[in-house]
Image (cartoon, rainbow, N blue to C red):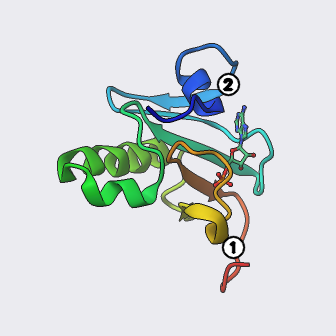
């Protein structure tokens, strides 16, 4: 059993979050410390701890996460101007919450390479 994270508690409704999109498979809510004018986190309702866990996950389930994130971005009207999708994994990737999440960043020009 993995530890209960802050995102488990968001999903359970125990911690308030600004939900911007939800479907059967994902929940999308505003990041508490936004790094862009629009900064949304997308989590699967079926918990995975990290990106590495996807290597052992049914591709359909992985797809539901990505489809959900794309639909969230579309619902937020981000597709036309563009946005960045980020998944941090592990220590060097600077993952701080052990519940997989996609960052949707938008509303400003992104830079490349990323820091
Ligand atoms: P990461 O570094 O990829 O694990 O990203 C974790 C993200 O979760 C950071 O951008 C935090 O600002 C964000 N975060 C932490 N706690 C909360 C919370 N209660 N509600 C929304 N976002 C949060």
Which residue is tagged 1? 110
| Residue 68 shown left or right of residue 88 in the figure | left
Of 35 and 88, the residue lying toward us: 88
Q: Residue at x 76, y 52 (%)?
A: 37
Q: Is mark 2 within 8 Å of ligand 1?
A: yes
The local crowd at label 1, few if under 14, some if 14 to 19, many if 20 or more residues have their Cα within 10 Å, is few
- Residue at the farthest right position: 33
47 to 50, vertically: above or below? above
Q: Secondary structure at mark 2?
A: loop
Can see residue 88? no
Earlier in the chain: of badge 2 and badge 1, it is: 2
Residue at the front extreme, as displayed? 1
x and y, in percent, of residue 61 in the image: 25, 44
**Which quadrant of the figure contains the N terminus?**
top left
The image shows residue 65 at horizontal and vertical percentages of: 36, 45
Residue shown at the point (66%, 84%) measured from the top left: 112
In this view, the mark in front (2 or 1): 2
The front one of 33 and 107 is 33
Residue 18 falls in which quadrant of the image? top right
Residue 32 x, y percent position in the rendering:
77, 38
The image quadrant where one finds the C terminus is bottom right
Callout 1: SS: loop
Number of residues whose C-alpha sits closer than 10 Å to that of mark 2, classed few (under 14), some (14–19) or many (20 or more): some
Measured Cα–Cα span from mark 2 to mark 1? 25 Å
- Within the image, what quadrant is residue 48 found in? top left
Quadrant position of ligand 1: top right
Look at the image and tell me whether residue 89 can be seen.
yes
Residue at numbered disc 2: 17
> Which of 18 and 56 lies nearest the eye of the viewer?
56
* Residue at figure coordinates x 32%, y 48% from the top left: 67
Residue 19 % position (x, y): 59, 27
Give left or right: position of 32 versus 48.
Answer: right
């Amino acid at each position: 059993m993995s530890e209960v994270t802050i995102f488990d508690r968001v999903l359970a409704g125990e911690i308030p979050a600004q939900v911007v999109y939800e479907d059967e498979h994902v929940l999308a809510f505003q990041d508490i410390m936004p790094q862009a004018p629009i900064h949304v986190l997308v989590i699967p309702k079926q918990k995975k701890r990290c990106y590495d866990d996807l290597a052992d996950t049914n591709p359909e389930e992985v797809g539901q996460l990505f489809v959900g994130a794309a639909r969230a971005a579309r619902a937020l009207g981000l597709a036309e101007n563009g946005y960045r999708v980020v998944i941090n994994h592990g220590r060097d990737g600077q993952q701080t919450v052990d519940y997989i999440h996609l960052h949707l960043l938008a509303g400003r020009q992104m830079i490349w390479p990323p820091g």
